[in-house]
Structure formats: C-alpha cells, structure tokens
Amino acid sequence: MLNLEGVPPLVAAALNCLYDRTHFAECPPESFDPLGSGVDDAIRLRFGLPTLDSWTPGTQSYQFRWNFLARPASGAPIRFVKAIPPALAGSRLLTTHTAPTTPHSWPSQKSSNWSGAYVAPRSGRSIVSVMANWVVPAVTAPTGGVATEYRNSTWIGLDGQRSYKDSTLPQIGTSQFWVAATGAATYGSWYQWWARGQHVPPVPLNLPVRPGDEISAIITALDSSTVRFNIKNVSLGLILQAFDVGAPPGYTVSGGTAEWIMERPSPLGMDGWAPYELPAYQPFSFTGCIAEARASADTTATPIDLELARLIRMYEIVQSPRSIRTISSAKKVLASPQRLELTYLGN
C-alpha cells in the first residue's frame, strides 16, 4: 500500500488499485554495470532492464537500448534508485493526464491539451514499444499571466490517440509546474495508466529531475495486458528501478498508436477538459523517437521513426476578443539524427 495520508479517500483507493497491479523488479546492487563483462540478457532481465540480443547492433532499436544502459559521459558508474518515494504528497496527485479532447483530422491536427506527435502501425501490426529522450524544459509564468498555477508534462505513451476497443494509455514522463504563490517551478517524474472514466492520477516516481536534465524512457508491452516501464536521468547517471504494470480490469494493450507528447494536464475528474494554464516553457526536443510494431507471425519487431509521425498542435480559446490561437507547436526534423521540436507560442 502507498503512504497516502491526506489524499481524498476515492483518490487513495484508485491509486492503491493501480499500485496493486504494479510489480517491481529487483533493484540492481550498487556496483552493477548493465554493460559490464559477463552481464548478459538473462541478468538484465532479472532486473527488468532493456535487453540487447534481440536487436541487430547498429540499428536504432539496439543503439537506443545500449545508450540507456550505458554509463554517463563522465565514466562514473550507473546508480539505481527505488521507484516509489517513501511518502507521496497529496497536492501532487490531483491532476490527470488524458487522451486529447479535440477530434483530429489529418494532416493538420489540433488539441486543447496535447502537443507533439504520434505514429500508428501498418500491415496488421500492433505497437509493442515506444521510446525517446528529451530534455526537461524550464518553465515559468507566461508574460502577463494571472493564473495561480501553470502545469505541463512531458511523456511517452502507448494507445490513447484513437478510440480502439479497450484502448487505454500507459504513460511515463516528467512534470513541470509553476506556482504563482511561491514564484517558483517544481519538477518531478511520474507514471500513469489512464482509462477513460477512471480518475486515477499519476503516481509520483523517485527519479529526481531538474530543468535541463536529459531523460530517457521506454515503455514495452510484455503481453496484451502488461507493460514494463524503464526511465533514466541520463544527466545524473540514475536509472529508476524497473516495474511492470497490469492493465485496468477489463482492458488490454491495443498497440494502436505510440505518442511523444507535451501536455497541459487537467484537474482530477475533468478527463482532459478545462486543463491547467500552460506555463511558458523553454524549447526542447524529443530525440531517439522509436516505436516498434509486430504482427503475430513476426519474429522481430519493425521500428517506426518520425518520418510517418503525425503532428499535433495545442490551442487555447481566447475569450476577448473571442478567438482560437496555437500555444504550442511541434515540428519534425528528419535529418539524422531525427528530432521532434516543441515550441511555446503562448505569448
């Protein structure tokens, strides 16, 4: 059970239900090197870490996983931290990350709460993993802003973009909040398995993050009802204890889409409507964006990069004079190395 003192009973019950579906891998010992001599995939699997033998050296899929396991550029040893903080602050839990609230049309797509990109599989395949790196954007209040707080989050996810049967949205990422009362920003890490109508807020994670830190994350569908979460603070050389999460009762992993998103979350229970005001964020990019898709007869997964990704821009409704304006845009850069650039346009 989580330590949820001060959290409303219904929220606490929902969080404990999610926690009960979570299995934490063994945390590696302090001296463990995931790429060290004598360490193979069997040992990496014991700790829930990405494996290498199923991918060809030199490919995008192999290189991303190898980089995830590698030591920092300084050569210092990788350190591992437990996934869940000893205590959870209730005030950080009362938001929810959701599917986009506005219907989309291709190629121009918009949302009131999402900005970024997504991909869908082809040829009867389903997406079985998604991964990316990003730099935690520094945030502040927009020029002339009068809201009491501003919130955004940066994450990768599976499903959620379309209304597939049993579609839900497992996600992992970082949060960036600005509170007017303190005149300061707070940053954190979290995971969530969203399902429409089930108001389960994100669960804070124990991975420290700072503005400017590079984050690397992978979500892997282990089967039709279980995903594995891996996340690393590359700048600090910290890997979070891996964990597997089961789908909400009655749901499965559809594998219909994979996302790389910057979102403005909503208060708990709003399901994407009436999102928090978007803070002014420093431009940043998702890099190493890869989704992997597989059909039942496939022996290997097929990588999907940004070339086929569809972009999403975020808008807000201005009341006086009444109009719609774009407040966050996404741009694909396909020259190697590929990246997805996110830019704040609110001011």
Image (cartoon, rainbow, N blue to C red):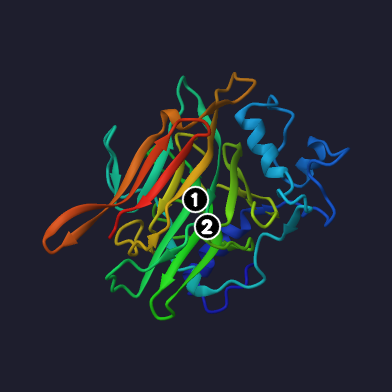
- The answer to which of 343 and 172 lies nearer the viewer is 343
Tell me what residue is drawn at x 76 percent, y 47 percent: 47
Element type at marker 2? strand
What residue is shown at x 36% (from left), y 69% (from top)? 141
Numbered label attached to residue 174 = 2
Q: Residue 95's quadrant in the figure?
A: bottom left
Q: Amino acid at mark 2?
A: Thr
Task: Work out whether 70 lies above or below 22.
Answer: above
Residue at the spot x=72%, y=36% of the render? 51
- The location of residue 299, given as percent across then percent down, is 64, 20
Nearest the eye: 325 or 4? 325
On residue 284, which mark appears?
Answer: none
The residue shown at (27%, 60%) is 347
Residue 167 appears in the picture as rendered? no
If you read the primary sequence from the N terminus, does the residue marked by circle 1 or circle 2 appear first? 1
The Cα–Cα distance between marks 1 and 2, rounded to whole angstroms, is: 6 Å
Do the CB atoms of the residues marked 1 and 2 lie less than 8 Å apart? yes
Check the image and name the residue furthest to the right.
Answer: 38
Q: Is residue 111 left or right of residue 13?
A: left
x, y percent for residue 300: 63, 23
- Residue that numbered label 1 is attached to: 155
